[in-house]
Image (spheres, rainbow, N blue to C red):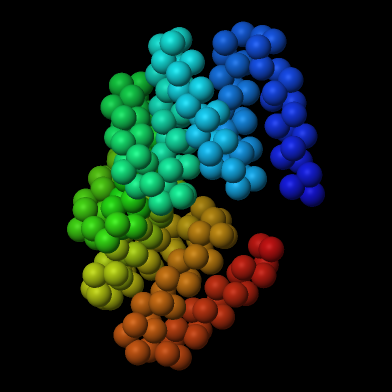
């Protein structure tokens, strides 16, 4: 099972540390951070990702530095340390732009939007998600477009602007259907159910929830 795989992976990475090139060392440090996060050890994840970040900076490897900062932001965000997460993402943004990683830039903007939403700043969240959407449209990143639209819908939902939220969720659902993103479709069906519930359209909400349940059961 998956839980049996993580300790074996961690053991392998630790055995390889200090045994090869700095590039391989970064792969191991990054892997150890991801494993710790997957196993519910955020403190361990921060330690490994911080070592990865230090090494990336020593090697002037901007791509690895961006990756380490993004992973650190993910860990901090997962435990509610929003200020630390924001700092990491904001430090990673200019690196993404410098190396021409538009997809990564969009994801970072989306992450910053989610952090703003988590702190109740829905207008700030919308500003970030609109930037993400613009980039995703420019590079024809359909997954990014669907994600940005979903996040824009969530922000409008919390603001009580249900008609706009519903339109955004429906747009996200159409794109996810085109690219076959089943899990994302299930989540968006649930979001549409939430909007209908908020509007008092309980029968329509139930239909969305049933469709979400069916799709969730299909993908396991």
Q: Position of residue 101 (x, y in %)?
A: 38, 28
Expressed as whole percent of the image width and height from the top left, the position of residue 90 reads: 29, 35
Residue found 62% across the figure and 8% down from its top: 21
Whether 58 is drawn above or below 136: the answer is: above
User: 140 above or below 67?
Assistant: below
Instruction: Please tell me which residue lies in front, 41 or 23.
Output: 41
In the visual, does 150 lie left or right of 19? left
Residue 44 seen from this side? yes
Q: Nearer the viewer, residue 39 or 133?
A: 39
Q: Residue at x 63, y 38 (%)?
A: 35
The x, y position of residue 219, in whole percent, is 66, 62
Residue at x 60% of width, y 16% of height: 25
Residue 45 falls in image quadrant:
top right
Q: Tell me residue 81's x, y (percent).
A: 38, 47
Tell me if residue 203 comes above or below residue 67 in the rendering: below
Residue 126 seen anywhere in this rendered image of the structure: no
**Which quadrant is the C terminus positioned in?**
bottom right
């Amino acid at each position: 099972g998956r839980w049996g795989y993580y300790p074996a992976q961690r053991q392998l990475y630790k055995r390889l540390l200090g045994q090869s090139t700095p590039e391989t060392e970064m792969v191991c440090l990054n892997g150890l951070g991801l494993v710790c996060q997957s196993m519910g050890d955020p403190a361990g994840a921060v330690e490994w990702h911080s070592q990865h970040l230090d090494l990336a900076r020593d090697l002037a490897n901007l791509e690895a530095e961006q990756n380490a900062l993004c992973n650190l932001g993910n860990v901090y965000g997962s435990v509610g340390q929003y200020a630390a997460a924001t700092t990491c993402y904001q430090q990673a943004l200019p690196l993404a732009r410098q190396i021409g990683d538009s997809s990564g830039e969009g994801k970072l903007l989306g992450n910053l939007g989610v952090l703003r939403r988590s702190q109740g700043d829905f207008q700030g969240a919308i500003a970030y998600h609109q930037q993400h959407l613009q980039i995703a449209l420019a590079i024809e990143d359909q997954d990014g477009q669907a994600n940005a639209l979903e996040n824009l819908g969530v922000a409008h939902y919390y603001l009580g602007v249900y008609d706009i939220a519903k339109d955004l969720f429906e747009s996200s659902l159409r794109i996810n259907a085109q690219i076959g993103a089943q899990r994302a479709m299930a989540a968006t069906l649930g979001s549409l159910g939430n909007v209908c519930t908020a509007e008092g359209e309980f029968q329509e909400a139930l239909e969305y929830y049933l469709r979400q349940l069916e799709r969730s059961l299909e993908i396991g």
